Image (spheres, rainbow, N blue to C red):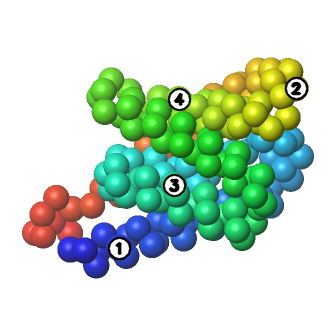
Amino acid sequence: MKTNKLTRSALLASLMLALGYVESLLPAFSAIPGIKLGLANTVLLYAVYICGVKSAVALAVIKVLLSGFLFGSPAAMLYSASGAALSLCAMLLLKRTGKFSPVGVSVAGAIAHNLGQCMAAACVIGISPVLAYFPMLLLSGAVTGLVTGTAAALVIKHMRPPKNKTEV
């Protein structure tokens, strides 16, 4: 059982990194600083719903560290870690209530991610520039969270692991 869990986590982490890299190649999203589609969050949302809290936290940490070392910088890692921490907390809390769909959880997670990044940026560059930029990030978080949440909801619906060994 541990081997299956480790293998699944490694595959999900690899998928998150690959999607993050693909996303960095999309010109529409790389032109505006801080705005990303969040394709890797589809995988993280799957982990929140299917794999559990420990696996989701581990995947978020792995994604921040590896993508930071491979594609980013220390500053990017700071912003990513701040956003990921707040986003994951929001998603886990909302999922736990049972009152939100994966799409709603995703939208909240995307907005929380942007809020976490803005809080980190406010500490680094000051609050005034961040406040001016935050409304655009809020709107983009809602839109991208809707898109990635819809994708994650479909994946969750169609790729649930079997509940017992007799299922295929």
Q: Position of residue 11 (x, y in %)?
A: 46, 72
**In this rendering, which labeled residue sits more in front, label 2 or label 4?**
2
Circle 2: is it few (<14), some (14-19), or many (20+) Cα within 10 Å?
A: few
Which residue is the site of mark 1? 6
Judging depth in this view, the residue of 102 and 75 nearest the camera is 75
Q: Which mark is residue 108?
A: 4
Pick whichever of labels 3 and 4 is earlier in the sequence: 3
Q: Quadrant of residue 162?
A: bottom left
Looking at the image, tell me whether mark 1 or mark 4 is earlier in sequence order: 1
- Answer with mark 2 or mark 1, whichever residue precedes in sequence: 1
Where residue 117 is drawn, which disc sits there?
none
* Residue 20, image x, y percentages: 67, 59
Q: CA distance from mark 1 to mark 4?
A: 28 Å
Q: Using the rendered view, name the quadrant where residue 100 is placed.
A: top left
Please state which amino acid type lies under the numbered disc 2.
Answer: Pro
Could you give the CA–CA distance between mark 2 and mark 4, rounded to whole angstroms? 23 Å
For the residue marked with disc 4, what is the amino acid? Ala
- Of the image marks 2 and 4, the number of the one nearer the N terminus: 4
What residue did someone put label 2 on?
Answer: 129
Q: Helix, strand or loop at disc 2?
A: helix
Q: Secondary structure at mark 4?
A: helix
Between 60 and 148, the one nearer to me in the picture = 60
Mark 2 vs 3, N-terminal side: 3
Amino acid found under the numbered disc labelled 3: Ala
Q: Residue at x 81, y 24 (%)?
A: 127
Q: Are marks 1 and 4 in contact (CB under 8 Å)?
A: no
Type of the residue with mark 1 = Leu
Residue under label 3: 60
